[in-house]
Image (cartoon, helix red, strand yellow):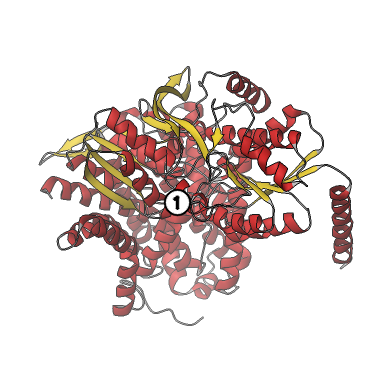
Amino acid sequence: MTFVLFAEQVLNGLQLGAMLFLMASGLTLVFGVMGLINLAHGSLYMIGAFAAAAVAAATGSFLLALAASLAAAAAAGALVEVSVIRRLYDRDHLDQVLATFALILIFSEGTRWVFGSFPLYLDIPSYLAGPVTLPGGIEYSLYRLTIIAIGAAVALGLYLLITRTRIGVQIRAGESDREMIAALGVNISKLYTIVFAMGAALAGLAGALIGPLQSVQIGMGEPVLILAFVVIVIGGIGSGKGALVASILVGLTDTLGRFLLPIAFGAFMDPSDATAIGSALASMSIYVLMAFVLVVRPTGLYGVAQHEA
Amino acid sequence: MRFKSIAPALVAVALSTAAEAAEDGNGLRVGMITTLSGGGAGLGIDVRDGFMLAIKQSGRSDIEVIVEDDQRKPDVAVQLADKMIQSDKVAVLTGIIWSNLAMAVVPSATAQGKFYLSPNAGPSELAGQGCHPNYFNVAWQNDNLHEAAGAYANDAGFKNSFILAPNYPAGKDALTGYKRFYKGALAGELYTKLGQTDYAAEIAQIRASDADSVFFFLPGGMGISFIKQYADSGVEIPVLGPAFSFDQGILQAVGAAALGVKNTSQWSKDLDNPANKNFVAAFQTEYGRLPSLYASQGYDTANLLLSAASKASVSDADAFRAALEAAEFDSVRGDFSFGPNHHPIQNIYVREVIQEGDVFTNKIIATGLTAHSDAYAAECKM
């Protein structure tokens, strides 16, 4: 194993982390402010990817495609919040899970009606295609570096939004005491719609960014959704900082686990067994990490104990 | 409340008419269980469309096909099979795409005396010890395309392959199939997580290895992700794989990244025989798109069924089985016959991904294996 290979794998881990952060930040924001478990977050990711693929096919512009993904996912998020989600805030989590699971089915089949059953095409724009050579002779995909940069920019933007703006103050207040900020005259239902649409837009952006690397197809959101839930559980539900740290942690654990575990087992076993056992354990690694974090800190890395409502 | 009381009555009426239709004479009723919704729907839709095209071309109105969606779930497939056998009284079942669903449905259906014609899944269990006189596979045994890729790797002079597949039974069969024919060394062997969509870690290892070729089996969206990421990574080692990741349905989603990739298939749209020319033209006229591998398999399955139905009635199971075994139909693959375990003996070709106008498609460049059977036929006793 060389330094170059290891460095490339660390970058891969960071890129996965950046993508997970885009998903997890919206999910954790919605849970923190509204107390809502939204299983349909993966569908918003899918909507972003499909919108980007459709606009890229029509216009040929990747920037327009990204803008379309933000707009489409935010619009879908706002629509769903007003029509369905709003009725679920006072219900228990089981009702929320059931209703948002129904939304997954509706979005999946609805997308299939509109776009058909075959995966759509979305390519890396020519100015971001191909590898670049980094210091130390590391060859790395420029597009993946761009995803890392966008993830970092979104993290900074969210931090500024939450700490420096009026809406950020309202979001923080909503997290600590919902009834009190309503009593203070803040239009709580408008705030909820904005927060939900914002989370949706971030999920849509994640889908559009990942579309060129993967396949834009029905059901693409669900595997990512599971990882995003792992991230917010590790980071502490409702914590933006936790989502950032846990995204990077999960991204690195998953990537380096897949890479290092088979090598580690290969040191004392025969290669084909080592590959089989190593890859089996690697696919468990992030869940082991989650279990470990929950044993040490039951509320997650940055979670605060939920006070009973 | 009113609806609830009407619903059972409607169901009863529907069932009784269905049962009457089955009893009134020589009609042949076929149950198709296939995947029409969710992630793998493209495959099931192609099989169904190919199958229905052949039925339509035959002009036989006495053959009734009941199509149901299994949602890629084994439990749903089992329920549909029970319903089709017990209330719809089908004599022949077909349509299943995935091996795990086939394993859940086929043994019980054939044990009840029904015929099963597989248009896609070919698990080794059903080719070897678990073979059954009423089970016919019209596509391939699961290992076949991978074996042909291994044989082609020798012909192409590859000596050091990096191979990868998802960590599940069909993935292990794939790498076993490749290694059964490939004679060179292995630069690396990797099992990835089923459903994995990011292959950056694997591609980094391929880059760091001194492989001269990469063989991968990653069906559906996994393959699209891999090949796009591979093309973007700047790794230039030649890639080969089975047709599943380079088929008509998904090539447009992969785009230029797949150009030049070699893949193995028992069918290609440029195979030069009259049945295939007719099929490709008719499919485009009927559905407005190019047929895929899966559509060709659905079409052949229906034509096999039609050839048997024209010679014998399904009520005479022995005669019907003998007519199926004869396989006297014009396969779009050219020469086609069944081996002793009711799996195909056929050529497997090597195709290259090319661009025709603005459409990505395949053309045949070599024959990987000639008149190839499978490795499990000897274990089949029937």
The answer to whether one can see residue B314 in this image is: yes
Question: Residue B127: x, y in percent?
Answer: 50, 49
Q: Is residue B141 above or below residue B354?
A: below
Is A265 on the left or on the right of B322, as rendered? Answer: left
Q: Quadrant of residue B2?
A: bottom right
Q: Quadrant of residue B290?
A: top right
Q: Residue furthest bottom?
A: A308
At label 1, which amino acid type do we have?
Answer: Ala
The answer to whether one can see residue A166 in this image is: no
Report the front residue among A280 and A55. A280
Report the front residue among A214 and A268. A268
Count of numbered circles in the view: 1
Crowding around mark 1 (Cα neighbors within 10 Å: few <14, some 14 to 19, many 20+) is: many
Question: Residue B184: x, y in percent?
Answer: 23, 38
Is A35 on the left or on the right of A172, as rendered? Answer: right
Q: Is residue B255 above or below residue B273?
A: below
Q: Which chain contains the residue that carries disc 1?
A: A
Q: Secondary structure at mark 1?
A: helix
Q: To which residue does mark 1 refer?
A: A203
Is B285 on the left or on the right of B185, as rendered? Answer: right
Question: Residue A194: x, y in percent?
Answer: 51, 56
Question: Residue B110: x, y in percent?
Answer: 64, 54
Q: Residue at x 33, y 28 (%)?
A: A126
Q: Is residue B178 above or below residue B18?
A: above
Q: Quadrant of residue A150?
A: top left
> Which quarter of the rendered picture does the N terminus of chain B lie within?
bottom right
Q: Residue at x 69, y 55 (%)?
A: B113
